[in-house]
Amino acid sequence: MTDKLEVDIKVPNQTRYLGLIGKIGEDIARTLKRFKGDREELAYHINLVLTEAISNAIRHANDDDPDKEIHISIYIKDQKLHIRVYDQGEGFDITRLPSPELKYLDEHGRGVYIIRSLMDEVTYKRLKDGHVLEMIKSLH
């Protein structure tokens, strides 16, 4: 039997929910019985990518607007963990961010670099009412 999971969360556009969502991600990673790697390491990575993605959505995409919300979807399909973070902002071109390895780069873009480093697939797409950042991790 494969792991079956689907979690759907909506929270106000406030950073005080980062820890809660990160903890949920950790707990999900720890329950993935079929994951062949280190579940504690996966839990740490999922917490990190979730908090980075949500922080970016709150601060940059939603411009710290308290009237907006963040929607997070986590599910497993075809032995892959899918994490989607939806925002209501204007968006940006994820492919145009410079590498944070460059000495002159400031703090911007490091979160996306971390996410790309820890996940197997990362996309950012425009939707009718905003954007979605999808992060996928293979569980093989």
Image (cartoon, rainbow, N blue to C red):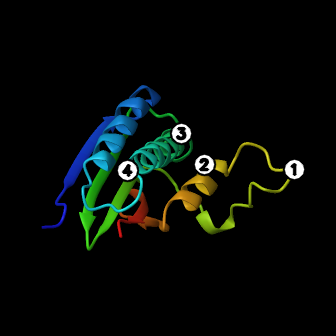
Give the position of the C terminus as an image quadrant.
Answer: bottom left
Q: Residue furthest left?
A: 1
User: Relative to 100, does residue 139 appear above or below in the rendering?
Assistant: below
- State the residue position of label 3: 63
- The span from disc 1 to disc 3 (Cα, nearest Å) is 25 Å
Q: Earlier in the sequence, mark 4 or mark 2?
A: 4
Residue 81 percent across, percent down from the top left: 33, 62
4 vs 1, front mark: 4
Q: Are marks 4 and 1 in contact (CB under 8 Å)?
A: no
Front residue of 25 and 92: 25
Q: Are marks 1 and 3 in contact (CB under 8 Å)?
A: no
- The span from disc 2 to disc 1 (Cα, nearest Å) is 16 Å
Residue 98 percent across, percent down from the top left: 74, 61
The kind of secondary structure element at disc 1 is loop
Q: Is residue 16 left or right of residue 95?
A: left
What mark, if any, has residue 111 been given in the picture? 2
Q: Residue at x 69, y 61 (%)?
A: 97
- State the residue position of label 1: 104
Task: Specify the amino acid type for callout 3.
Answer: Asp
Q: Earlier in the sequence, mark 2 or mark 1?
A: 1
Q: Earlier in the sequence, mark 3 or mark 4?
A: 4
Task: Specify the amino acid type for callout 4.
Answer: Arg
Q: Earlier in the sequence, mark 4 or mark 1?
A: 4
